[in-house]
Amino acid sequence: MPKFDVEKVREALDVVAAHESVPDSMAILLYAACDRIEKLEAVRESASAMLELMDRFESYGHVIDLLRKELAVLGANEKEEDALMPPTSLRVSLLSMTPNAEALIYAAAKQCVSEYDASVLFESAVNSHNVHDFDFMDVGGQVELIRRVMASGHLGVVEPAQFSFGVAGVSRALSHQLVRHRLASYSQQSQRYVKADGFDYVLPPSILKNFEANNLYCNMMELINQAYERLRKNHGIPAEDARFVLPNACETKIVVTMNARSLLHFFEQRCCLRAQWEIRALANEMLLLCKEAVPVIFEKAGAACVRKGFCEEDKCCGRAPRLKDVIPYGK
Ligand SMILES: Cc1cc2nc3c(=O)[nH]c(=O)nc-3n(C[C@H](O)[C@H](O)[C@H](O)COP(=O)(O)OP(=O)(O)OC[C@H]3O[C@@H](n4cnc5c(N)ncnc54)[C@H](O)[C@@H]3O)c2cc1C
């Protein structure tokens, strides 16, 4: 991902800030962002990630377009150095998953009704061939069987498929919610072993969009960082105690492993519009990766209403009918 040369960004900002359609408050915000890069020594997120984040806010769209144009004119994205803003943003990757997951699920489902050993079923599914002429074993047949079994609610068969994700650029507020999902395994970056000097932090969209709130928030992050570093460096406080001043916003990195059934449940809860925005963004990214990896398991995955066709939440967003409207005695 390209990173931006701060000098060039500043030059581009001068042009953009002078543009009549750019409000002063926006220009000040962008300049403040630029100042902050120069002050902070730690490696920062790439400017393009920040631009992508800001792109999501309509009101900033034209400013970002202008900035991008100026940066392109200046060739500012050539230099692999500083970046535009310290706030970080979500990064998710599928690190590993059960090999031949689809064949494994097929074999597990088929075992229930087959006289053959699972090893025979699995091998024929992996190689998509018909063993002993006893069954329809092509890929289409596998997919159809998995669909049928899942549709009948026998989700135990998808449990053997495991998925491990690397998650970074998320807040401790998010990880606290994430680890409430108990049918999973986690390895989280330690605040005892990894010093948080000049920590990265997550900037919620509602704050990013509000100039005064944004200033208050970013200044508070600086103050917290100063307190943290002083505790450690001036007062000899160990990181495990100094971290008590760190905010929920502090960036964390975590490896999470769930099986397919647990993931389906996680998506039901966390892709829902009632879920908090940051964990919803994470769940949506994980869902995309899963859909790409094993489409047949996750083709109908998503918020509970997507899977069930109705909503059980008290405060329904209106995307699907409520349970009590679908089944009069449902709730
Ligand atoms: C919109 C939203 C708001 C929330 N607000 C709050 C809140 O205000 N406060 C709060 O504390 N939490 C809150 N939560 C977290 C929520 O209560 C759950 O802890 C979290 O979503 C994990 O769900 P889970 O227990 O179903 O998942 P998992 O822990 O992954 O469990 C999956 C399933 O396994 C079964 N299971 C797991 N462990 C047990 C067990 N010990 N006994 C019996 N069955 C078990 C259950 O069927 C469970 O649904 C919120 C969650 C959402 C989505």
Image: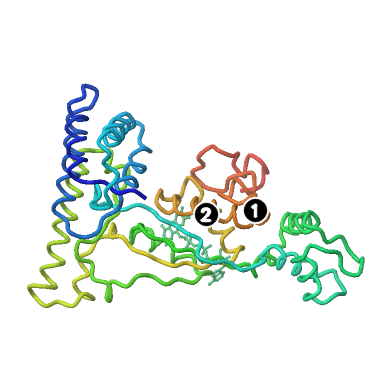
Write the residue at 31% across / 42% down: 206
Mark 2, residue position: 269
Q: From the viewer's perspective, tell me whether residue 191 is left or right of residue 222.
A: right
Write the residue at 14% across / 76% down: 237
Of 81 and 120, nearer the camera is: 81
Q: Ligand 1 near label 2 (Cβ, under 8 Å)? A: yes
Q: Hey, which quadrant is residue 157 in on the image? A: bottom right
Which amino acid type is shown beneath numbered disc 2? Answer: Gln
Which amino acid type is shown beneath numbered disc 1? Answer: Pro
SS for callout 2: helix
Label 2 crowd (10 A; few <14 / some 14-19 / many >=20): some
Using the image, determine if residue 291 lies above or below residue 124: above
* Nearer the camera: disc 2 or disc 1: 1
Of 16 and 287, nearer the camera is: 16
| Residue at the top extreme, as displayed | 20
Mark 1, residue position: 295
In percent of width and height, residue 167 lies at: 42, 61
In percent of width and height, residue 41 lies at: 17, 59
Write the residue at 23% across / 64% down: 246
In percent of width and height, residue 300 lies at: 64, 49
| Residue at the left extreme, as displayed | 234
Whole-angstrom CA distance, mark 2 to mark 1, is: 20 Å
SS for callout 1: helix
